[in-house]
Image (tube, helix red, strand yellow):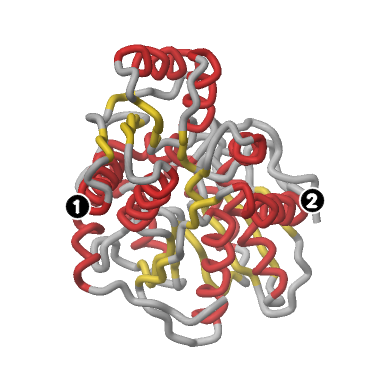
């Protein structure tokens, strides 16, 4: 992994804005990332009882790096875990994934405590998906260095948290606006939908709109509407939006179901749209490959896991790291699909090894 990057002060306000609503939008953040949970086993080498942790033996000689993530079998979470397992093993550590089947840190905590009681854990990643996780981080952080990922946690708000990594929502919102504006040749009308109205998605939608207004003044961006998380209802809502305005020739969705939503509406209406949605799950990449969707935002899921392992390995050996370690969220057009399919394949392979 590359060297550490500290966000300039002009970006730090974004982190503060996001914190206030994290508790209310934890499940929304997951929906914005991709798919619903999967109750299946995390991998073939899963150990312990049915609701215990998923383990990757790894055979590393340097000790163990631990990954703590409730709702552990969510498909998007498993991409993150694949990045962690891949990098953890490469660095010579044994690796273990711990998490309840639900988004429930109190249910996960006893599983973590059982692993920690055996000793050998050199450092741990803990998914700080909302402030209810902070007391656990404070407790475990007394004895272990802790890194979190994906959800912004402003420095100083979670006692015991040493570092964070993940992308900056305002950056990918700007990049998506530029990509659509260029594809439209600077003229047209863009519909915007969100999974729900919440701080993160609202911020992305606003940044997208502001960027388009500044750089492509002849592109009209419509007021955001909620598409929701039920696929048939979301498609129906998108079709309704298209029927209400014949000038719409593009769509931007801030949620992981957006590519399916707008591709379906496009087909149902017989219209051709320039569509950008979220996340490189295989279903969305297939839509980009087929040309039904122009691009998806590549929130760095696999990369976040790998970066977390990298940071933990440095901390485990007494090294120092920056608190904030941002990663880019690439706009994935058809030419970049093979790269991200490769990451999905690595994640799947890491689970099976």
Where is residue 274 drawn, in percent x and y?
46, 35
Relative to the observer, which residue lies in front, 67 or 331? 331
| Residue at figure coordinates x 22%, y 29% from the top left | 223
Nearer the viewer's eye, disc 2 or disc 1? Answer: 1
Total numbered circles: 2
Against 320, is 254 above or below? above
Relative to the observer, which residue lies in front, 281 or 309? 281
The mark nearer the N terminus, 2 or 1, is 1
Residue 352's disc number: 2
Q: Quadrant of the N terminus?
A: bottom right
| Element at label 2 | helix
Whole-angstrom CA distance, mark 2 to mark 1, is 39 Å
Where is residue 258 drawn, in percent x and y?
46, 31
Q: Quadrant of the C terminus?
A: bottom right
Where is residue 93 drawn, in percent x and y?
68, 73
| Residue at figure coordinates x 52%, y 61% from the top left | 304
Name the residue tied to disc 1. 17
| Residue at figure coordinates x 25%, y 74% from the top left | 8
Where is residue 320 drawn, in percent x and y?
43, 85
Please tell me in which quadrant of the rendered image residue 52 appears.
top right
């Amino acid at each position: 992994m590359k060297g550490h990057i500290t966000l300039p002060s002009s970006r730090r306000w974004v982190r503060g804005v996001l914190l206030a609503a994290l508790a209310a939008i934890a499940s929304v953040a997951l929906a914005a990332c991709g798919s619903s949970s999967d109750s299946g086993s995390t991998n073939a080498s899963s150990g312990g009882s049915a609701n215990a942790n998923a383990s990757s033996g790894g055979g590393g000689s340097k000790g163990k790096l631990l990954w703590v993530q409730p709702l552990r079998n969510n498909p998007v979470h498993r991409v993150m875990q694949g990045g962690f397992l891949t990098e953890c093993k490469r660095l010579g550590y044994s690796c273990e994934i711990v998490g309840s089947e639900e988004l429930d840190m109190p249910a996960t905590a006893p599983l973590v405590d059982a692993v920690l009681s055996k000793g050998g854990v050199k450092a741990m990643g803990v998914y700080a998906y909302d402030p209810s996780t902070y007391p656990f981080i404070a407790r475990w952080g007394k004895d272990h260095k802790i890194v979190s990922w994906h959800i912004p946690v402003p420095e100083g708000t979670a006692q015991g948290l040493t570092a964070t990594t993940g992308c900056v929502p305002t950056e990918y919102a700007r990049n998506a606006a530029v990509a659509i504006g260029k594809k439209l040749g600077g003229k047209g009308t863009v519909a915007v939908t969100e999974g729900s109205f919440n701080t993160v998605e609202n911020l992305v939608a606003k940044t997208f709109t502001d960027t388009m207004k500044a750089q492509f003044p002849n592109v009209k961006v419509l007021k955001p509407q909620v598409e929701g998380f039920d696929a048939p209802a979301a498609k129906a809502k998108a079709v309704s939006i298209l029927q209400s305005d014949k000038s719409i020739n593009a769509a931007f969705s801030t949620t992981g179901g957006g590519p399916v939503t707008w591709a379906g509406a496009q087909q149902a209406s017989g219209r051709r749209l320039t569509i950008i949605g979220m996340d490189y799950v295989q279903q969305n990449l297939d839509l980009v490959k087929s040309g039904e969707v122009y691009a998806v935002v590549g929130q760095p899921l696999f990369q976040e896991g790998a970066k977390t392992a990298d940071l933990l390995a440095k901390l485990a050996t007494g090294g120092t790291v920056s608190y904030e370690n941002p990663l880019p969220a690439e706009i994935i057009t058809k030419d970049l699909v093979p790269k991200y399919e490769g990451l999905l394949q690595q994640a799947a392979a890491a689970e099976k090894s």
